[in-house]
Image: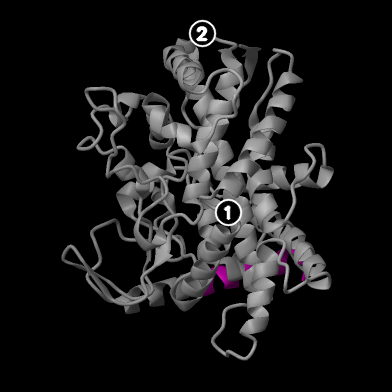
Amino acid sequence: MELGGALTIFLAICLSCLVLLSAWRRMHKGGKLPPGPTPLPFLGNLLQVSTSETFKSFLAVSSGVAFANGERWRQLRRFSLTTLRNFGMGKRSIEERIQEEGQYLLEEFRKTKGLPFDPTFFLSRTVSNVISSVVFGSRFDYEDKTFLSLLRMINESFIEMSTPWAQLYDMYSSVMQYLPGRHNRIYYLIEDLKKFVAEKVKANEATLDPNSPRDFIDCYLIQREKEKANPSSEFNIKNLILTTLNLFFAGTETVSTTLRYGFLLLLKHPDVQERVHQEIDQVIGPNRLPASEDRMRMPFTDAVIHEIQRLTDIVPLGLPHTVIRDTQFRGYTLPKGTDVFPLLGSVLRDPEYFSQPEKFNPGHFLDEKGRFKKNEAFVPFSSGKRICLGEAMARMELFLYFTTTLQHFSLKSLVAPEDIDISPKVSGFGNIPPTYELCLVPR
């Protein structure tokens, strides 16, 4: 038999098995599920998901994939929160790391000499170095080839995650990884990132001093040794690699993407940028380093950053999770094992809480006297027990990077503000800002 014929038969068998498996799962799932279109075997509701507007599609059909849950999630989250706090999350030390990286960023910005450039990797390098100093114990040189390769893989992975192929891969990864197609790209990207983290883990194991932990990896290895006699411990090398990669990936891509989208919005709204400049001049001045405590005296800047996060909605689907027991929700029954998306974007653009949900309006976070006001529908970091591990760090980074940059530069667009298109170039798991260039003019 020719190779092509054998491959065709193999694919047909695999597809048939998946169809039967999907149908069986559907028949035995039970429960009174919320309304929605009937899923097809194997494909589910994939054909009803738009490739360019995945969030809107999921808002209509409620499909999803699973992340870690149960005891593993509890153990690893508790440990990660404690360790990150010990390394300065929300404390002076992490602020100093961000301030230091902010100065490196300014040096890189000055090298552009006012000429047009794409800010993507300028921002990802500086943001990534903050989380790198926590999880790996040191920062990278901006020209380090390995570092640049990692950032490209992270950037491409975030884009690939927003394609329907990624959803299909997540649902049937045990089979899909062996089948040809675009879905394999995300698999290989993640595997390469895992290999890098694994090498870092091996290096730390070889030089570990239990009395002097250098970074997140060291702390994890020490905890693993403490729990080696505990049969229910989740502290193994596999979980260390995945948890470290989670922190590194999320700590790099989400903040840098928000900054990149934020710069674009300020280019489109120069009046808003000018008001931020005025507030910076009034509160911080031209020379002093911006500090997190300045936020309390800068309500307009604070409102602008909140509105950037709200409108850009970087992770509109939120992180998917699995129901760990039969759950009653608004008269419906979600059987154990059901995968759900929280759809954060539906809250961030709720007209009940935001008067102009589709427009950029910092006034959504200001009262009639110009004071900053909180809004309970502002949930870009999710909420409850599943709230983002790095919320405190991300909030500090966004404020310090925005103010540090605008303290020294004015952002200039290459086109008229009214011609700037802020529509995401890809919208799925993440909202990816369009590629653009800008000029930085020293103030």
Q: Amino acid at mark 1?
A: Gly
The quarter of the image holding the C terminus is top right
Magenta part of the protein: which range? 1-17
Above or below 65: residue 153: above
For image coordinates 58% across by 66% down, the residue present is 173
Q: Colour scheme used in the picture?
A: one colour
For image coordinates 54% across by 44% down, the residue present is 254
- Are dots 2 and 1 in contact, CB under 8 Å? no
User: Do we see residue 177 in this rendering?
Assistant: no
Mark 2 / mark 1, whichever is N-terminal: 1
Residue nearest the observer in this picture, 280 or 44: 280
Left or right side of 234 for 64: left
Distance from the alpha carbon under mark 2 to that under mark 1: 42 Å
For image coordinates 73% across by 26% down, the residue present is 108
Above or below 42: residue 232: below
Q: Which mark is residue 416?
A: 2
- Quarter of the image holding residue 225? bottom right
